[in-house]
Image (tube, grey):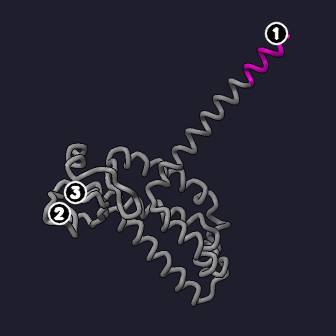
Amino acid sequence: MASSFSSSSSSKQFRSSSQQLGDMAFKGVGNLLKVLPTGTVFLYQFLNPVLSNNGHCHTLNKYLTGILLTICGFSCCFTSFTDSYVGNDGVIHYGIATTKGLWPSSKSENLSAYKLRFGDFVHGFFTVLVFAVIVLLDPNTVGCYYPSFQSSQKVLLMALPPVVGAISSSVFMIFPNKRHGIGYPSSQTPQEYSQSSS
């Protein structure tokens, strides 16, 4: 009876540690995916099979897929330069980060704490890089633009996501993002933001 209890508890410990490892992996992937705008990724995943003809592209499909990739890539980068704040009126306001603060801004509030920073450019670049990896893993895009790549470079396609994920995660830890761009609610007033970014 005691031996069955000890084997039961050791299997629980094994499941517990493997579950913890799985939870950590999913948390890492989730944190990486938080970098990308959800609406942009959804739009890409929804429209790409239609525009790429499920990977069997004709010339028109290649152009339409290219336009979709350009728009989604731009959207990923652009959202790295947007921010929001709760104004004195209690309403959430959105704007684009500039060297002086947010644009458009109200005259009554000091938004200089929201200035453009070097980290915004780093986030913009790596957000596009992560989106590019998602595009490379999509069989419709691979089948449309470079069908021979899928079979001949399978090792690269398998190794690229973890490498880019590790590099991006490290960079995002060095340059943490405090922006709440378009689509992300802000709970901070401009005064609270300037105190937290100091």
Of callouts 2 and 3, which one flags the residue occurring earlier in the amino acid sequence? 3
Quadrant of the image for the C terminus?
Answer: top left
Q: Which residue does the image show at 29% across and 63% down from the upper left?
A: 93
Q: Residues within 10 Å of mark 1 (few under 14, many from 20)?
A: few
Q: Which residue does the image show at 21% across and 65% down from the upper left?
A: 98
Query: Answer yes or no: do the residues labelled 1 and 3 have beta carbons within 8 Å?
Result: no
Residue positioned most to the right: 1
Residue positioned most to the bottom: 60
Q: Secondary structure at mark 3?
A: loop
In this image, 3 relative to 168: left or right? right
In this image, 17 relative to 166: left or right? right
Q: Secondary structure at mark 2?
A: loop
Gap between marks 1 and 3, in whole Å? 66 Å
Residue that numbered label 2 is attached to: 99
Gap between marks 2 and 3, in whole Å? 23 Å
Q: Nearer the viewer, residue 141 or 96?
A: 96
Query: In the rendered structure, which segment of residues is drawn in magenta?
Result: 1-11
* Label drawn at residue 88: 3
**Chief secondary structure of the magenta portion:** helix
Q: Residues within 10 Å of mark 3 (few under 14, many from 20)?
A: few
Of callouts 1 and 3, which one flags the residue occurring earlier in the amino acid sequence? 1
In this image, 95 relative to 19: left or right? left
Q: Amino acid at mark 3?
A: Asn
Residue that numbered label 1 is attached to: 2
Discs 1/3, front: 3
Gap between marks 1 and 2, in whole Å? 69 Å
Q: Is residue 45 above or below residue 119?
A: below
Q: Which residue does the image show at 63% across and 80% down from the upper left?
A: 50
Q: Amino acid at mark 2?
A: Thr
